[in-house]
Amino acid sequence: MSEKTKITKHSTEAQERAEIFKTIYGVKKGLFSEVLDLFEEDYNRYKNKGINKIQELYRNYSYAIFFQYSPSSIRNNLVKFKNIIKKNGGKYQANAIEAFTIDAIYSPLKKRDEEVKRDLKSKVQSGDNTSTDPKIIINQIKALKEELDKKSYSLARNQKEPQVRAYRIVAMLGLATGRRFTELMKTLVITKRGTKITFDGLLKGNDKAIQGHIIGLTYKEVQKYLKELRAYAMTEKLTENEVNSKYARVFNNAMDRLGFKNVKSLRHNYSVAGSQLFREEGETLEDTITRILGHKEVFTSALNYT
């Protein structure tokens, strides 16, 4: 391998690793030093709260230790983590130092290393909003729901858990229902009668309810997460413009960190999957997209999503 090829390969790996770190840990630049700072905060929070919490820290940060590193780099990474543990002490310091060793961590993870890399890489790459495969959109929804249900996300510096959950709920519900941001945050009303689901409270001049189609979630799950989202954002007394003014920018930034271009791209992903999953006999692609998104009679709007 030429020197130039090595440099290119290492540069690509570093960029990929940075994207993984940003996705998993919510750090701004995806630097290892940022992950260390985050670990120090977490360690000080949990150092006196039991061995289980120490083991959980190891699981949360093992990606940062092992992802795309050589054995010598892994040893150096472990030293950096152990130095933080030694500096900050704690009731379970000895257990933590024992956990962050090659013998304790590397052997079991080495067998799963390639699988872990593939899984993490797919989570980042599946945020590509040009995908036309409904299975990818469904997998995105499942991954977000699993993070919410298992609370397997990490909190970045100055983030609170309800805030992190709200970001993921918007991403998940946007993909699952195709509804606009303000509709999810405030106006959308979903009802079910028998097997028929209805979406009401649509915006952009559409005052008619439409037949609703949900991807990857049940009606009850959508209702549950809508309730949690609105309780967090407290949008009941806000106008639609106030909702957008207060939340649109920060949620768009959060979507970028989760692997999506912005909130609107979720609606695009939904239309791509829904046009294949819910297409009725005799419908054109534009017909289906117009119907499931709730556009009025104007087909030109649907062309933006094809």
Image (cartoon, helix red, strand yellow):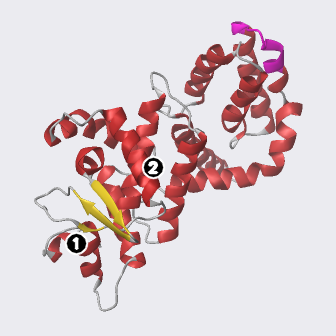
Q: Amino acid at mark 2?
A: Gly
Image position of 21 with respect to 159: above or below? below
Contact, mark 2 vs mark 1 (Cβ under 8 Å): no
Q: Is residue 79 left or right of residue 252?
A: right
Label of residue 259 in the image: 2
Q: Residue furthest bottom?
A: 282
Span shown in magenta: 87-97
Point out residue 14 in the picture as x, y percentages from the top left corner: 59, 41
Mark 2 vs mark 1, foreground winner is 1
User: In the rendered image, which quarter is residue 268 located in?
Assistant: bottom left
Q: Secondary structure at mark 1?
A: helix
In magenta stretch: residue 162:
no
- Residue at x 40%, y 58% (from the top left corner): 175
Q: Secondary structure at mark 2?
A: loop
- Residue at x 57%, y 44% (from the top left corner): 149
Q: Residue furthest front?
A: 194
- Residue at x 45%, y 49% (from the top left corner): 259
Q: Is residue 291 left or right of residue 22?
A: left
Label of residue 302 in the image: 1
Q: Is residue 173 visible?
A: yes
